[in-house]
Image (cartoon, helix red, strand yellow):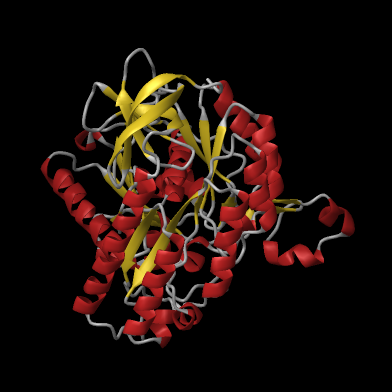
Amino acid sequence: MEKIIDEKKQGESLVLEQKEGNKRKLFIESYGCQMNFSDSEIVASILNGQGYNTTQNLEEADLVLVNTCSIRDKAEQTVRKRLEKYNAVKQESNPNMKVGVLGCMAERLKSKFLEEEKIVDLVVGPDAYKDLPNLLAEVDEGRDAINVILSKEETYGDISPVRLDSNGVTAFVSITRGCDNMCTFCVVPFTRGRERSRDPQSIIEEVNDLWNKGYKEVTLLGQNVDSFLWYGGGLKKDFDKAGDIQKATAVNFAQLLSMCAEAQPKMRFRFSTSNPQDMTLDVIETMAKYDNICKYIHLPVQSGSNRILKEMNRQHTREEYFELIDNIRSIIPDCAISQDMIAGFPTETEADHQDTLSLMAYVKYDFGFMFAYSERPGTLAERKLEDDIPLEVKKRRLNEIIALQQKHSKLRTEAQLGKTVEVLIEKESKKSNEHWAGRNSQNTVVVFSKEHYKAGDFVNVKVTDCTSATLIGEAVGYSENN
C-alpha cells in the first residue's frame, strides 16, 4: 500500500494492562486494516480471562499470535517473514513457545497453513475467537488446533475489548462485520463472511464506557459501515422477511451516528469504511448536523473507468460517484475525502487509466491509499480474468496516480494556511518530543509546540506551514470542546 498520509501502525506488538494472578505471557501482532487491530483487542480480552498477560518481549512469550491480512500478496509475505522470526526465537531460546495465526489469512488458507508453516500450532478465523480457550487446550495437549468456521451472527458485541497500546485518547468500536458486495478483486467476503450488524445499545454502552475512561474520540468500524442495519439480529439480506414491528424500529447507519453523537456530545466520532453505492444522503446530512461528527469520509472508488468498475463488480458508475461527491461538497463544504485506487486491474487500457486520473482531477482527494493490482486466490477476478497488465505498466500507472495525489494533497493542506483548526492531541510528534501531534476534524495530522497542553486536550491551532501530509502551526488556546 502506498500511503500519502496514514498514522495507522502496522505490525506493532501491543501492550495490555497486566492482570494480577495471570502467569502466562501473550505476544500479539496485528497487520492490515483497523478491524484487525480492533479484533486483536477482543482476542486479548478473551485470553486475559484465560490467564494471559501481554508482553512486548517476544523471547518470553508462552503464546505468540499474529493477526493477518489477505488483501494483497505483499501482506501475506510479511506475515510469513514474521513466522520465520518466531521460529528462530523458538529454536534459539524458547522451545515451549506456541504460535497461532489469526484473521483473514488464517481463514483463507485454513488447514493448509499447518502444512506449510510447521511452526504454527493453531489457526483461527475472524469469527472463531471465542473458541480460543478450547483451541489452546488442544494445543496444550500436543495437538494442532483449527477453527475457521464463518458465523452468520457473531459480532463480539458482548465482549468488552481491552485497549491495546492505547494512547488513552482514541479508540475503535466495531459496528458491523463481513461484507456482501462481492467485488471481484476482494477476499473479504470469503474471509469475514456475510454482513451483520451489532446491537446499537451495545455500541452506545461501549461508547459511554470509553468516555467514562477518558477517551475523546471513537472510530466506528466496519467493512462497510453504511450498510449498518439493526432490526433485532440476523443478516441484512433477511431484512425483507422481518416483521412490521422489527422494520419500524430498525436502526440504520445515519440513525446510529445520531445516537452516538447525542449520547456523548463532547466526544468526536469518525467512521470507516464507506461504500459509494451504500452511502445515502441522510448519512451526509447527519454529519452536517452534529459538530462532533468529524468532517471526513474515506470513500474508496478503485477506478475512474466505468468499464473497469463493471469488471470489478462495483455497484456504482463514474457519474454516480461524481453525484455523491457533489452532494458531499454541497452539504459539507469543508469535508475531506480520501480514496482507495487500484492500478493495473486486468484488461485496464491506457484510456481506462486516464479515466482514473481525470476522476482524481475532478475530486482532488485530500489523501489516498493506492495499490498495484495483486491477484488474490479464490476471488472472481482470479478465476475469470487473466492478470494481463505487465508489472512495469502497473508500476508506471501507480506512480502517476501517486504523483497526482501528492499534488492534490499539497493543494488541500496549503488551503489551510493562515486558518485556525481544532486539534485533538493524541501523542508526541514522531520527529520531536517537544511537539504534540493530533488530527483535525478532516483527519489531517497537525503538529505544534507542546507548551502547557496535554494529550486529550482539544486545542485551536493556527496553521503557519504545511507539507502534503501535515499541517504545522501554533496553539492559540483551548477550543470550546475542551
The residue under the point 36% across, 44% down is: 413
Compared with 56, 222 (above or below) is: below
Q: Quadrant of residue 418?
A: top left
Between 254 and 476, the one nearer to me in the picture: 476
Between 409 and 83, the one nearer to me in the picture: 409
Name the spot of residue 474 as percent of width and height, x first.
34, 24
Q: Quadrant of residue 205?
A: top right
Compared with 383, 242 (above or below) is: above
Q: Is residue 348 visible?
A: no
Asked whether, in this view, residue 311 is left or right of residue 24, the answer is: right
Residue that sits furthest to the top in the current view: 452
Q: How many marks?
A: 0
Name the spot of residue 382 as percent of width and height, x first.
38, 81
The residue under the point 49% across, 73% down is: 183
Asked whether, in this view, residue 282 is left or right of residue 375, the answer is: right
Compared with 348, 64 (above or below) is: above
Name the spot of residue 29 as percent of width and height, x first.
32, 44
Asked whether, in this view, residue 93 is left or right of residue 13, the answer is: left
The residue under the point 67% across, 49% down is: 285
The residue under the point 60% across, 33% down is: 207
Name the spot of residue 49 as percent of width and height, x first.
48, 32
Residue that sits furthest to the front in the current view: 418
Q: Is residue 370 visible?
A: yes
Quarter of the picture holding the N terminus: bottom left
Asked whether, in this view, residue 242 is left or right of residue 80, the answer is: right
Compared with 276, 443 (above or below) is: above
Residue that sits furthest to the right in the current view: 244
